[in-house]
Amino acid sequence: MSEYQFYEFRTIDRPFSATEKAEIKTWSSRGEVDSHKAQFVYNYGDFRKNPEDVMFQYFDAELYYANFGTKKLMFRFPLALVNKKDLIPYTFSDNIELCTKGDYVLLIIEENVEDGAYEDYFEADDCTLSDLMGVRQQIINGDYRALYLAWLYFHSPDSQATFPADYYDDEEEDDEKAKMNAEEPPCPPNLKNLGSDLQHFVDFWGLSEDWVKAAALSSKLANENAINLPDLIAKLPEMEKNDFLLRLANHEANLSGVFLQKLKQFLPKKGKESSEGRKIQEIAELAEDVRTGR
């Protein structure tokens, strides 16, 4: 099987400057670059830059695929737009990581297949960042379904993830037993209604529909009107309101997200949104019931 590597980088919050665009074009003769996207395909050789470094400097999202056994999806968030503490419960080993540098936090979701190759050959049109862009905004909005689904995938039979040492109760415990004893992170609402972005996300990783449906059995329906914005705005000091209006007049990027994060500070603290911390064994049994009931 010939080697194939696909890189797609996107900027969402702003277009490239002319200087940045010229710089990115020098990285590879195999690149396609426009005002918001840089795409590189390799059948031999490799990308000469460190993807994490260029993400922190230039981009908001990256999708990477190598047919010899690697998939990766990265999103960059301004620290002002996300609560990092809320994201940490969904991290897992080397597969779901958070890295912070300067004013940004980088979410890295990565799989390296143990046998070293994917059976299916990925094409650039199979899944692009355009299909997954909405996931980044969902996370900014406090919707962590993608993070939960990624965690679920790496604990499902569809993944070949290697489990860290702290998953094992004793030295003789095997990977399967360690996996089945894992306790799920907070289960977010609305898993029964994924929408196109999350469906593309599930398809990209290859998480089975049965596992999604099994996990969704304990997922509540969110009340879209639960956050009363007028009431929260009324709690904001007048000086801060005027400051936000001035920043709005100056066309500050991502201001709506920053404003929403500020208002969320006035919300009452919520308990754990979880189905009593189910073990993966329980979800696996539910998934089997779903499969046999089809």
Image: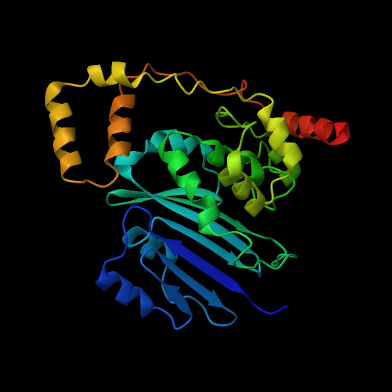
Residue at the image point whose x is 26% and y is 67% from the top: 17
Q: Is residue 161 visible?
A: no
Q: Quadrant of residue 87?
A: top left
Instruction: Give the total number of marks visible in the rendering.
Output: 0
Judging from the image, the colouring scheme is rainbow
On the image, the x and y values in percent for residue 233 come to 26, 21
Measured along the vertical axis of the image, is residue 225 above or below residue 254? above
Q: Is residue 180 above or below residue 35?
A: above
The image shows residue 106 at horizontal and vertical percentages of 41, 51
Q: Quadrant of the N terminus?
A: bottom right
Splitting the image into 4 quarters, where does residue 235 fall? top left
> Residue at image x 72%, y 38%?
211
Task: In the rendered view, tell whether residue 288 sits above or below residue 232.
Answer: below
Furthest-front residue in this view: 249
Question: Camera-side residue: 249 or 257?
Answer: 249
Position of 202 with respect to 76 (left or right) is right
Q: Position of residue 276 (x, y in %)?
A: 62, 20
The answer to whether residue 92 of the structure is visible from this angle is yes
Q: Is residue 179 left or right of residue 139?
A: right
| Residue nearest the viewer, comparing 105 with 30 | 30
Q: Position of residue 45 (x, y in %)?
A: 54, 82
Indicate the quadrant containing the C terminus: top left, top right, bottom left or bottom right: top right
Q: Which residue is situated farthest in the right direction here?
A: 292
Q: Is residue 3 above or below residue 63?
A: below
Q: Residue at x 65, y 23 (%)?
A: 218
Q: Is residue 238 left or right of residue 235?
A: left
